[in-house]
Amino acid sequence: MPDTSPMPPGPLADVAHEPCVAKPDPILVADEVRRSFGGLTAVDVDHLEVQRGVITAVIGPNGAGKTTFFNLLTGFDSPDHGSWSFNGVDLTGQASHHIARKGLVRTFQLTKALSRLTVMDNMKLGAVDQRGERLLNAVFSALWRDQEREIEGRATEILERFQLLDKQDDYAGELSGGQRKLLEMARALMVGPELILLDEPMAGVNPALVQSLLRHVTQLRDDGMSVIFVEHDMDVVMNISDWVAVLAEGRVIAEGPPASILSNPDVISAYLGSDEGADGFLDGE
Amino acid sequence: MDEPLRSHATPRSLVCAVTAALLLGLALTLVSTAPAQAEPDDLVLAQSEDDEGSPTLLFGTFRNQEGPVEGIEASVSSEDDTVIETVTTDENGQWEVEVPAGGTYLVTVESLPEGISLREGERSTAEASVDEGQRQAVVFRLGEAAETAGFGAQAAQQLLSGVRFGLIIAMTAVGLSLVFGTTGLINFAHGEFVVFGAILTWFINVSAGVNLILATVLGVVLSGVLGAGVDRVLFRPLRRRGLSLFQLLVVTIGLSLAIRFTLLMFYGGSTRRYTDYVGQQQVSLGPLSATPRDLTIMALSIVVLVLVATMLRTSRLGKAMRAVADNRDLAESSGIDVERIIGIVWIVGAGLAGLGGIFYGTSLGVNYFSGFQLLLLMFAGVILGGLGTAYGAMFGSLVVGIITELSVLWFPDEIKFAWALGVLVIVLLFRPQGLLGRRERIG
Amino acid sequence: MDLISVAETALRSAFGPQAAFYALLAIGLNVHYGYTGLLNFGQVGFMLVGAYGVGISVATFGLSLWAGVGVAIVFAIALALLLGAPTLRLRSDYFAITTIAIAEVLRLLVRSSPATDLTGGPFGLQSVAVEFYAVNPLPAGLSLGPLTYPVAVTWSLLVTWTLVVLATVLVALLMKSPWGRVLRAIREDEDAARSLGKNVFSYKMQSLVLGGVIGSLGGVMYAIAGSTVNADIFRPQVTFYAYAILILGGAASRLGPIVGAVIFWFLFSFVQGFVRQAQSADLLPDFFSSGAIGGAALTLTGIGLMLLVVFRPQGIFGNKRELALDA
């Protein structure tokens, strides 16, 4: 397959542009992960490696199984078959909260801001290993007051970065859609993730906010985190991702740097066969 | 337990007085909260009525599988063992003793006719407390008659009762299931729709003297009107307000209390029967026996259920109902008037509930408090079959009725409903989508 | 008609034993529903195991009352674990139906005649609280305007309302803590809580146990106050009245359950007294049956519950701003 697109910089420079390819330093490795609903196979990923320290975009036509794949990786759904590991630790069959605590944290396509908690409470909730979250300690505030103060400090820092600090005492339900997306991302950072999975972070966000959200995502990478995100908007994908994996009908049909994907005939035909069509794909909608 | 009493300054009489005062307080509040003293149990026939100035009575009925038992001698004595009266049961198996005042009495079975015995483990003396001016039922359970049929015949007979009961639950449960299917609402007042139909029919039949068949027709129509009214006045506006699931559940609970206790205000706490088709002789059908009344009820129930199933499957209306249940938005966009369909679902569901209630009442008597018990059995049936599918509700209810009645072969009659509810819990744990339901995420 | 005496009686019930038991039930429900979003419709089951825990220990096995209270709490914890283990993963409407069914099964079992040796069956258990009244330190009953109670009632009221206050303080402290924050997060969206590394199942279970134990104390005090236990009290309606109280006072508010219980029992008793007087004065039309006294108050309870949950779902103390966010 002739490929004239420029090589991505950094660790992925020497990686072949083909599906299921091995990466030099994978943080996440999935093997033969399958999930079907009734007769319909939603996810059927033979092998996928996600490189550490880069932004990987997962794209694909509607119904390609992107969100289901996210749900499986993060323990929100259980696969019929398959295994995956994170930092070399097998995560297969682990409960979602264990997976989150190991540093693999996700956000949701439909934002899950905790409406009747304040923005600050949303943030504090993200911190792990809180002494005050144990029932027997909870009554005695002396046991957790210091830790709480430390968590609040961290939350304040992150809120400041996400320009939400002046909203800290508002209920999360009072924020705008875009602010909720920001809050959800900020809250996920409180968990201290190594790999963050963003499910359509730009969906439903006011275009004015998109640029600021994008900056936050690239900032995550620059801070040393690995990022996977699902996105429909091809402009966004071209803009910020270092590597793209394309899912169609549950399978990984292509991988490569963003530029190589646009010209990949398999990808174009996958989109052509879908509702969105190649136009949608090429227009970046 | 007498030790601390004697050794302590608190005299026994004070404790008694305190206890009595507290009991009285409780009687005024909790007991009136739950005036349903007796269960719809074959062995307990009457209710305590709270008429002031009326005599204080102890009473009861002796029955076994074959019906009331005559000639049982029982005595009522006060706590200090003075016998107040000795009575013998009449041809209806009933006895009644007027006691001088409220208090605790001992009722003893003195002698039993040949071939009749108390149920194994049943004590021959029972303690009964009755308040001044009240009637209190005293229950003794009789064993199987000496020459009872073999286990197979008994099982067949219970199966028949189970089918009868199951058919009635099925008829009432269809509405519960249809309403849930089309609106996602679990209607806790559905049991009251059942009782509403039964009690209105009682007034039409007994107070107004209309023949039961005509009264049934009127009762079903009025039940349908209730369903229409409840949807139009209450739930249609509430659907527009976009209440939470919890708010809607609480509204149905409030509605159930309002209907139930309004019925109590007019109908009173007793279990009563319709005028027609009482005291029928059982006819034998091979090893089985049943009254023509019960056979008619079963036949009619089957006809109604088949009609409903056919309607759902083939008629335009039925298809529209299923379409709304399947996907409301899709149904709306394909030109179905969803609100009209939901309105019809309420009318049909309430009408069927009323009819089921009338059949239940014809068979077992009418009271105001059976609704909730039936509701739990309907839940069991509906969930067993698969929530939201009308056929599932019918099938599940039939199973629930049969389990309930068959359990009596091995276990006490009083806990027969517990088995049905136990089945509900087990189904939810292992196959929450029900036996006929589609697998979807409910967990 | 003597409305003054009706009002006085109503005031006595507002602070009487019923209000206090129901306040405990409602505080427990507040933990379940108000803070965690668990639609527990079987709270009466916890009251039942509380009452029978004491009753069986004392009346059947002759243990001391204090041991009985311990047994009651153990029963409540066991019920919460048994109830929650399989059902906490179910959708909330299924959870509601399952809890109501399990509570009703418990009632049918304890009142059945085969259980007579253990639970007294349909006759219930008597002489449960002799020890409690033996240690009554009060010289005389309360007499504060219309609030007059006999000495023994005053003693049990004192203990019950003390428990109500302690439970309220405990719940308030817990809900202010990070632990309470996790519960509220689960109420809002359990998947979000999960994605942040919280073991949702475990927290729901802790909530079920805590609220269940508090509810069971209502049963314990019911058994002690009347010195008897009778299965027919523990009907499903009891849970519904507790919900009415919780909604009236305001779910997820600290004082909601107490204020709700006091107001509920005042109104309830007032309506009952009013109808009773109307009936004895022959003011009621003949077509009302003898059930009118209990029926009227409960009918109004039902109507009030509907109006309340539709038009003022935040109750008296609930936060309107918070409720408006219910997505």
Image (tube, coloured by chain):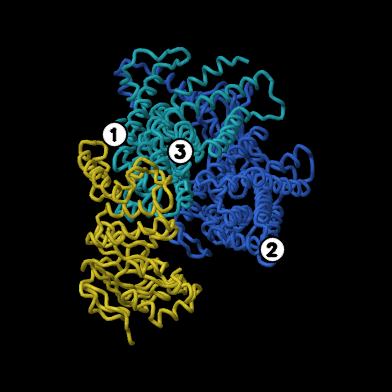
Residue of label 3: C321
Q: Residue at x 32, y 25 (%)?
A: C131
**Is residue C16 depicted above or below B113 in this figure?**
above
Query: Based on the displayed image, in which of its 4 quarters is residue A216 positioned?
Result: bottom left
Question: Which hue is chain B drawn in?
Answer: blue
Residue B136 position, x and y percent, is 56, 31
Is residue A205 visible in the rendered structure shown here?
yes
Which mark's residue is nearer the viewer, 2 or 3? 3
Which mark's residue is nearer the viewer, 2 or 1? 2
Q: Quadrant of the N terminus of chain A?
A: bottom left
Residue of label 2: B311
The circle on residue C67 is 1
The chain that hosts pointer 3 is C
Who comes first in sequence, dot 3 or dot 1?
1
Residue B290 position, x and y percent, is 66, 55
- In three-dimensional space, the C-alpha distance between marks 3 and 1, rounded to whole angstroms, equals 46 Å
Count residues near mark 1 (Cα–Cα under 10 Å), then give few for <14, some for 14-19, many for 20+: some
Which mark's residue is nearer the viewer, 3 or 1? 3
**Is residue C130 depicted above or below C91 in this figure?**
above
Q: Which chain is cyan?
A: C
